[in-house]
């Protein structure tokens, strides 16, 4: 249990590699403690789901278009057959303009492809203040590994 009290080993590994794959017990709690320890260490943490992420670079850093789902009740005469495009603000651009490290915590990372995981690793290399934790599934005990090792294994 000392691991969860300080979180020092997790933070050191995160700062060393930049992107970690996390496997947490399904009853929860461990990942919340780790995130709280990182926030106490000065990280600006942003928690979001990996579902619907699409192109990670565009979604996180650029103004991008999003089409709402067509529910069959709307007139498609005004826009295209797939609906009108809405502009969405980048998720992390405001956090990166401030000082200090930025943490992106992605839930449900098992839905991401190897190409998307590789793109996330590239973002960490390009922006050294950005650290990414991707929850990849459950495990009996809390464990993590560099995301790059997971991508090579896939």
Image: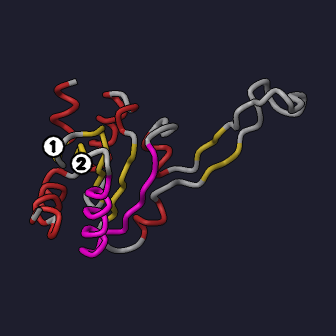
Q: Is mark 2 on a helix, strand or loop?
A: strand
Q: Position of residue 97 (x, y in %)?
A: 43, 68
Q: Is residue 55 left or right of residue 1?
A: right
Return the residue at label 2. 19
Q: Is residue 45 above or below residue 70?
A: below
* Upstream in sequence: badge 1 or badge 2: 2
The circle drawn on residue 68 is none
- In the rendered image, residue 39 lying in the magenta stretch gets the answer yes
Return the residue at label 1. 145
Q: Is residue 106 left or right of residue 58?
A: left
Q: Foreground: 31 or 80?
A: 31
Q: Is residue 98 above or below residue 115?
A: below
Q: In this view, does 151 lie above or below 65?
A: above
> Which region is colored magenta?
28-49
Q: In which quarter of the image is residue 45?
A: bottom left
Q: Is residue 12 above or below residue 51?
A: below
Q: Foreground: 138 or 49?
A: 138
């Amino acid at each position: 249990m000392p691991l969860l009290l300080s979180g020092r080993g997790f933070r050191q590994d995160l700062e060393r590699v930049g992107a970690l794959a996390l496997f947490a017990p399904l009853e929860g709690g461990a990942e919340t403690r780790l995130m709280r320890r990182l926030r106490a260490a000065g990280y600006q943490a942003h928690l979001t789901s990996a579902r619907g992420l699409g192109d990670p670079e565009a979604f996180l850093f650029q103004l991008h278009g999003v089409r709402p789902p067509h529910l069959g009740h709307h007139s498609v005469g005004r826009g295209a057959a797939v609906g009108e495009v809405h502009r969405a603000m980048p998720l992390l651009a405001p956090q990166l303009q401030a000082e200090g490290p930025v943490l992106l915590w992605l839930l449900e990372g098992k839905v991401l492809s190897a190409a998307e995981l590789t793109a996330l690793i590239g973002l960490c290399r390009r922006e050294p203040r950005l650290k990414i934790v991707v929850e990849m599934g459950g495990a009996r005990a809390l464990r993590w590994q560099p995301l790059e090792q997971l991508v090579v294994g896939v």
